[in-house]
Image (cartoon, rainbow, N blue to C red):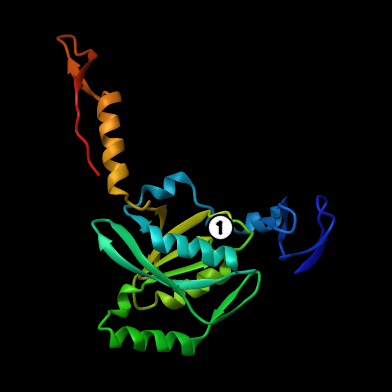
């Protein structure tokens, strides 16, 4: 950490090594990698093409709020685990928890005794500890990516099992991945809204009144040139 004077609020701010102040929200600062650090982590930057992998991490409404609130409440980083169920190719996060831990602006260290007690608690409730295979952590005011320290943690946690990982920051940016047998794939992360049945029915009726859906059909004539025709399609799904 190094002291840097913010040009906006004029306060001295503790800035992690290799980062600089990108945004000042008056006493709440965001950091971004310097050019040298960004060069070193280029391979960690997620680009659109990497998301061709199958599956999405979908976080239910309550656990997504918990994750955001934990992240906002912690002064530095914070980490925890999440319960996951498989639904087709997707991963549904149904709960998240935090444990006793020591945190800095760039690192979290979980209390192993607290983790052992949690696993014992799961066994007493006939829950499968293997379902809690999401490790999530925050980067506080920094951008979201998996650092070298994160890579070491992921390798340790995924040595004998499939592991999902999420990195989140105070702006609620998120990035995800899945690791298994030494291989990893980036995954999209999606927060699912809470379903309101009454509102859903009202919106559905309004769409039926105001929105006409048309499906494109491809038609070939004798010269093999493509023409386009419309056909009405009024199918809905939720």
Which residue lies at the image location 32% right of the left edge and 51% below the top edge? 195
Which image quarter is the C terminus in?
Answer: top left
Q: In the figure, is residue 139 to the left or right of 161?
A: right
Packing grade of label 1 (10 A; few <14, some 14-19, many >=20) is many
Q: In the figure, is residue 223 to the left or right of 54?
A: left
Instruction: Mark yes or no: residue 138 visible.
Output: no
Corner quadrant of residue 206: top left
Q: Is residue 90 above or below residue 228?
A: below
Which image quarter is the N terminus in?
Answer: bottom right
Instruction: Mark yes or no: residue 203 visible.
Output: yes
Corner quadrant of residue 40: bottom right
| Nearer to me, 224 or 191 | 191
Identify the secondary structure beneath mark 1: loop
Q: In the figure, is residue 160 to the left or right of 13?
A: left
Which residue lies at the image location 79% right of the left edge and 67% below the top edge? 2
Q: Is residue 24 above or below residue 226?
A: below
Instruction: Say which residue label 1 marks.
Output: 144
Counting from the top left corner in percent of width and height, residue 204 is at 27, 36
Counting from the top left corner in percent of width and height, residue 99 is at 49, 79
Counting from the top left corner in percent of width and height, residue 96 is at 41, 69
Corner quadrant of residue 82: bottom left
Counting from the top left corner in percent of width and height, residue 66 is at 46, 65
**Residue at the extreme top of the image, as rendered:** 223
Q: Is residue 229 above or below residue 40?
A: above
Which residue lies at the image location 27% right of the left edge and 80% below the top edge? 127
């Amino acid at each position: 950490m190094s002291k840097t004077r913010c040009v906006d609020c004029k306060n001295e701010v503790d800035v992690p090594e290799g980062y600089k102040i990108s945004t000042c929200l008056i006493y709440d600062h965001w950091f971004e990698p310097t050019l040298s650090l960004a060069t070193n982590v280029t391979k960690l930057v997620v680009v659109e093409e990497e998301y061709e992998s199958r599956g999405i991490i979908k976080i239910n409404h309550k656990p997504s709020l918990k994750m955001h609130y934990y992240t906002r409440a912690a002064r530095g980083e914070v980490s925890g685990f999440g319960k996951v169920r498989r639904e087709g190719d997707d991963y549904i996060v149904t709960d998240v928890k935090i444990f006793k831990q020591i945190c800095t602006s760039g690192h979290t260290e979980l209390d192993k005794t607290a983790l052992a007690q949690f696993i014992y608690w799961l066994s007493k409730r006939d829950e499968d500890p293997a379902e809690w295979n999401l490790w999530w952590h925050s980067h506080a005011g920094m951008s979201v990516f998996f650092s070298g320290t994160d890579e070491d943690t992921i390798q340790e946690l995924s040595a004998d099992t499939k592991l999902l990982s999420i990195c989140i920051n105070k702006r609620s940016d998120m990035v995800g991945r899945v690791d298994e047998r030494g291989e990893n794939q980036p995954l999209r992360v999606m927060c699912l809204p809470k379903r309101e049945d009454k509102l859903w029915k009202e919106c559905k009726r309004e769409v039926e009144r105001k929105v006409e859906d048309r499906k494109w059909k491809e038609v070939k004539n004798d010269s093999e040139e493509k023409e386009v025709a419309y056909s009405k399609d009024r199918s809905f799904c939720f």
